[in-house]
Image (cartoon, coloured by chain):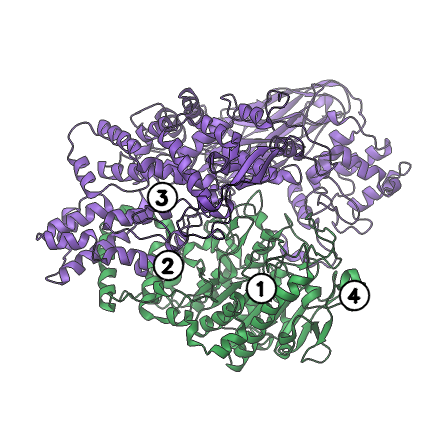
Amino acid sequence: MPFRSIQSVLGLLCASLTGVLVLAERAPDSPLPPGPPLPEISSLIIEPPTLRLENARDSRRVLVFGKRPDGRVIDLTAQAHFQASQSSSNSLAIDDDGYISSGKAADVDVTISAAGQTATLPVHVAGAALPPVGFVRDIEPILGRVGCNQGTCHGSAKGKNGFKLSLRGYDPEYDYQALVNDLSGRRFNRVNADDSLMLLKATAEVPHEGRQAIRPGSRYHALLKQWISEGASFEEPTARATNITILPEKVEIDLPGRQQQLLVIASYRDGTTRDVTREAILTSNNEEIAQVKNGQVTAVRRGEMAVLVRYEGIYSSREVFIMGDRSGFEFAAMPEYNFVDHPINTKMERVKINPSDLCTDAEFIRRASLDLTGQPPTSDQVRAFLSQAGDSRVKRKEWVDQLMASPAFPDFWANKFADLLQCNSENLGRKGVVVFRNWIREQLAANRPYDQFVRDLLLAKGSTFENPAGNYLRALRDPGKMTEDVSQTFLGVRFNCNKCHDHPFERWTQTQYYEFGAYFAQVAFKPGTLGRDHLIRPGATYAEDQVSEAVVYQNYNGGEMRHPKNDKVMEPRPPYGKARDIGAGEDRRAALVDWLTSKDNPYFARSAANRFWSYFFGRGIIDPVDDIRAGNPPSNPELLAALTDDFIKSGFDLRHLMRTICESRAYQLSIVPNRWNADDLVNFSHAQPRRLSAEQMLDAVSVATGHRPQFKDMPAGLRAVEAPDGMVGGNEFLTLFGRPKRQSACECERSSNVTLAHALNLINGPTLGDCVTSSDNHLAKLVSSEKDDRKVIEEVYLSCLSRPPTDKESSEIKLGEGAKRLEGAQDLAWALLNSPAFLFNR
Amino acid sequence: MISIPGEYGATCDGFSRREFLRLGGAGIVGVTLSDILRLQAEQAPNAGPAPGNPKNGWGRAKSVIILYLQGGPSHIDIWDPKPDAPSNIRGDFKPIRSKVPGLFLSEVMPKLAQQMDKATLIRSMSYTPVGLFNHTAAIYQIMTGYTPDRVSPSGQLEPPAPNDFPHFGSQISRLRPPEVPMLPFVMLPRPLQESNVIGKGGTAGFLGAAYDPYYFYQDPAQEINLADLTLRQEVSRERLDRRASLLKTVNDAMPDMEKAVGKYALDSYYHKAFDLVSSGRARDAFDLNKEPATLRDRYGRHTFGQGCLLARRLIEAGTRVVQMNWPAVSNGDPTVDAWDTHAANFGPLRNLHCPKLDSGLAALIEDMDQRGLLKETLVVALGEFGRSPRLGVSTSGNTNSPDGRDHWPYCYTAFIAGAGVGRGAVYGKSDATGSSPSENPVHPTQIVATIYHALGIDPHTMVLNHLNQPRELVQAEPVLGLFS
């Protein structure tokens, strides 16, 4: 198989001469499921239906589909047989992969046969000229394909053994100079091309640490050789491909083991196109669902994945859906409560998933309370909600409104935003975190539109004590971190790779990084005068609060962003779209925020809508939410588009967005899966249990037991979500359960796993233990005032799990007599707090 | 208390449902660990002849201590002095004699020099990075035996994922569970971390969360809080039992809930946690106050030194694998004792790092040897790479100060001792400038293979991943020449 040999060449490219690296060579490829038997095929469909070959170097192939009697199609490209019509067979060459080329201008019919059917492909050969080989169009893609310019070889920052190429070929001009001019042009022998060092090295005829990257006699070898013989010329960099198209448009594979060939067609400025499937890099974003080799997707199991395609700095992806055996499926749509449910229904119907049932009222009140306010309802609230008569859907709506109107709502979301905005005392000092967190909370309490909120953060000036919004830029400090964190937080795009080189998996370039950074280049800080008098805690020393006020100001005289390669001063420019000009004497940030927060910015509203969706479902429509790129497509684009449009129309109203989500049917589905959605994780067909966050868990223990642990240096009775500082000490529980230190813009800084250490802490640690046994908690009062064991048990269930016990539970549990009765109630609370029904939002 | 028969013993309870199925439902009783190992070995297509010979170190180790010097310590300035090289290579430090004639260490390692008669230096560690060239990729490789490009298209810039290859400690805790109720695999004083990515390469990956290490988050140089491991005053053993059975009653009534959170392996954690709390074994092991003050002083009253001592106590209590991560994360800041010395290599090494490494490692080797523990414990100290022989040059794309050294995976040194490894030996050789091995190069994945081999586990054993696909423990050969 040709692809296998390329793979092993790649694996060996950077092997050292000692040969030790052989050990790290790739494992045998994962076994793929066997191909299922071919179904009945009634006819063939060829895509594209005709082929046009421009010249003698043009070689192209087609996709062959078999049409089944029921209208569905399957890919037969791999087993298709190609035969040129008799008269012309001497001019048409068809290789093993089905690539057709010709050295003679003619019109030729190719007969394609597969699965007992045949079809005819008309091929028009427009010209027989052999055009010159161009570096940009022909050679650079080969260097990329065989791996010469990858990060571990000549593409590394220092090159390899005196020869350096730009990483993955992002700079063709540089690469050309490196090849042609380095070593005084010794890499080429234009008279006898075979003696060129460039060929001898690549074919390992002289020692090459990267071993044999190109086989003598191969197509690539011939191209390189001809390029050298023709004088190793360089056409304009504009000869680079401008776009790629992936065929087919839609990939739906019926069963594991079945395959689908993809074609990658590059288009160029001059209007020509070229089949670059063999040079493009195709990778699977989920090898467990489908694998990609030689442009061919092989289904491993039912599911959804994307094939990422990279060619000469252009990135695209093709989503693939594998249906699997769904016989017996009948779609049962969920009722559509609001507009978000419609695209979810549509998607479920397409991929043959049925939604779970509606969750119970008791489940809903707990879920919505935790999601909107970070704490579960009290037992009284649960009782009132469950006994309230009337339409459950109306009741739930009202409960959402009630939660949003409560002070716990801005408390909880201020904590969430304080994470993203990196509110920690190491950066901001003790007073800084308090004023910043309070400012954030005020914005949320007033429901300040999201775009205005972001504008305030990025445009802030003056004292960070008097205008606390300035603490955001202060926490980020330098223009580089501002570039990276602002793009990750407000656009959902990661800009950290292209600080040092063009992004290896995305279209972002290094130049764009510094152009974007130039908007922040004049943001400056100086120490303020408010210090000692503004200490947050009476009696604290100045040293303890050493990070005091800072003043954010615009430094017009200095502050330029320079490109590290050529030290050129970068003009501020956004990475995509167009920003308005910066007025004379105007703060550059003003033009930036106009561009950033515009409703026409394709990332701003969309990334926020997606991010907030993830807070309610445990997963974004694009996931991870802060890594939006071509290779990470949304699982339901229509859903994300509808949610985004609505968010923009509402005037960036965050409460409206959250209300829309909470009132949808999708949000109110049960965690219990059915036969048709048990394996679905991406289509929101059932709720996923989400481990409570550190703060939610601690606050929920307090609600359940009535005992609130005390934080160091904080007022008594403070909820965990009210603590202003990511660094607040004195509570190992919060650290253990993954509260972030707020040093990063990444959502991943917060962890939500469960390990042995968590289990130990929950069953035997001081936090839960103290809350359950403290003498001032609900349990002590309850047991002494309530004589009926059943009622005690009911109350403990309501306060721990937000639901009454079932009759079975209530009768199975015994509290004990006399002094043992309190112990029994404590043990029951302990057990409930240790059950997954408590530890998870479900 | 809830007892889980076989959870720690040599039966198959510790194995996954999938293996039960493969072995057939009827055969569970009486199937032993060795049967399963044999089965797994027989399944391996390329297992080759079992290297079962105690002379070449096979099965000599019962447990493993990894002192992971994260950041990449400078081999020339610590283990492999090059006094004859030009000054921009040899650096500021002079060589000193060790207890072994002809074996020299750098002057910043005086205590260890006196213990070199019990250990081997591998001075020919070498590899060329596959995929990206940075810390996380290197960490992933040495911990799992695989490169991160095997699991994700963008390499190692992603947090740990359930399809990651398992850390060798997780593999070992599964294939060789402890013989007593004890934490099988402990990592201290923090998980692996690099560039905001926490834990990559340090998890059980596709084996499932139940085989993750126990992350001990505390600083052993401070007073250790044992609250989680000590039975609370108001909770007697009987009451804990009662609570455990109540928890079972409560959970049994909610089967849907249990099913929905299956992937979190809560059951397994709770079982282990109950066992640990009631046996008290782990609590005692973590209690460094049980050690005489003089011994604690000898290890050094700092996180690394006390961590080494804690590692010894854990091994004594039955833990299979202890990994002590160097406390400071590599960040190139010369005021922090992190090994990533891009800037100001010498001052910090002399004053900050090496005194701690020297006292901790020397005391551990001496103490383990005196107690007879070294005979059956493999002790390995190494980082993800060495540092560039030439000062002030950039090899990784990072900037370096004129007296800094950049990453250098092409040649560096690993320290290895115990379980039959040569005493007072040097394995392999570096060239005159410490730039590449001149004899017996050793790839880091071979260290992983050597660890398995020492524990009597064939490194080529196939383990099924989460998709039931066979995956070799590691695709490398053990370094048999290390064993005397």
Mark with earlier residue (2, 1): 2
Q: Which residue is mark 3?
A: A721
- In the figure, what tint was chain A given? purple
Which element carries disc 2, helix, strand or loop? loop
**Are tags 3 and 1 found on a single chain?**
no
Mark 3 belongs to chain: A
Mark 1 belongs to chain: B
- In the figure, what tint was chain B given? green
Q: Is residue A7 left or right of residue A230?
A: left
Can residue A226 be seen from the camera position used here? yes
Q: Which residue is mark 2?
A: B24
Q: Which mark is residue B245?
A: none
Q: What is the crowding at mark 1: few (fewer than 14 residues within 10 Å), some, or many (at least 20)?
A: many
Mark with earlier residue (4, 1): 4
Q: Is residue A306 left or right of residue B118?
A: left
Task: Find residue A97 and report its horizontal and vertical position in percent.
Answer: 65, 34
Mark 4 belongs to chain: B
Q: Which mark is residue B449?
A: 1
Mark 4 → mark 3, Cα distance in angstroms: 59 Å
Q: Which residue is mark 4?
A: B432
Q: Which residue type does callout 1 highlight?
A: Ala
Q: What is the crowding at mark 2: few (fewer than 14 residues within 10 Å), some, or many (at least 20)?
A: few
